[in-house]
Amino acid sequence: MPETVSALIALGGNIGDVAGAMQSALGRLHAEPGMSVVSVSPIYSTPPWGITEQPRFLNACAEVETSIPPHVLLQRVLAAERGAGRRRLRRWGPRTLDIDILAYGDQAIESPTLTVPHPRMFERAFVLVPLADIAGERVIGGRRVSDALSALDTSGIIRTDDLLSLPRAA
């Protein structure tokens, strides 16, 4: 049996039923062979980042236990984005769903299509706030998530009443 690793993913969006898109994507990923969603954060409402003249985002994080290689995981999260109607029109612009791989075990990966740990995660409170809920003590790229979060401005990030549930086995 292949080795299982813990992968951390970030989910976000600001168009349509974002919480529903996140839940559907987690269900889709959980149903894939070699993958199991084992924890999910609460959902947070966050100010837009990059292009600020757009609606607020919803953001969450999840932990996935997986035995699939990281580039296959990338293909599966991209397919989940497309399943939610994601079209890549403008960098940092509005989107139905965006899923980023933040960490894949303790591996450092740098390829033309995938960089892990995510190269900008420690600059983004909208990623670290939900990530700290499920992996605050995890060390990624030599930094503890909770320590990295303490160095960022979290004003404007509000926990919502929306909750994601762990997908059930099929």
Image (cartoon, helix red, strand yellow):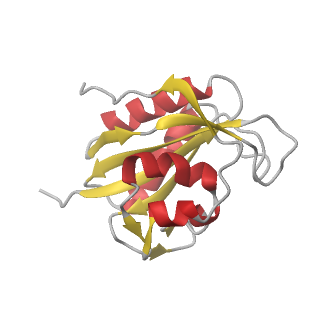
In the picture shown, does residue 166 fall above or below 53? above
Which quarter of the figure has residue 113? bottom right
Answer whether residue 114 is visible to the viewer in this image.
no
In the picture shown, does residue 109 fall above or below 67? below
Q: Is residue 36 left or right of residue 51?
A: left
Residue 23: x, y in percent? Answer: 47, 28
Quarter of the image where the N terminus is located: bottom left
Residue nearer the viewer, 52 or 26? 52
Residue 160: x, y in percent? Answer: 58, 28
Q: Residue at x 71, y 46 (%)?
A: 88
Residue nearer the viewer, 83 or 124? 124
Q: In this view, does 14 lie to the left or right of 108?
A: right
Which quarter of the figure has residue 53? top right
Q: Which residue is drawn at 80% across and 49% down?
A: 90
Q: Which residue is drawn at 32% across and 33% down?
A: 31
In the picture shown, does residue 105 fall above or below 43? below
Residue 42: x, y in percent? Answer: 48, 35
Q: Residue at x 18, y 61 (%)?
A: 3
Q: Is residue 52 left or right of residue 147?
A: right
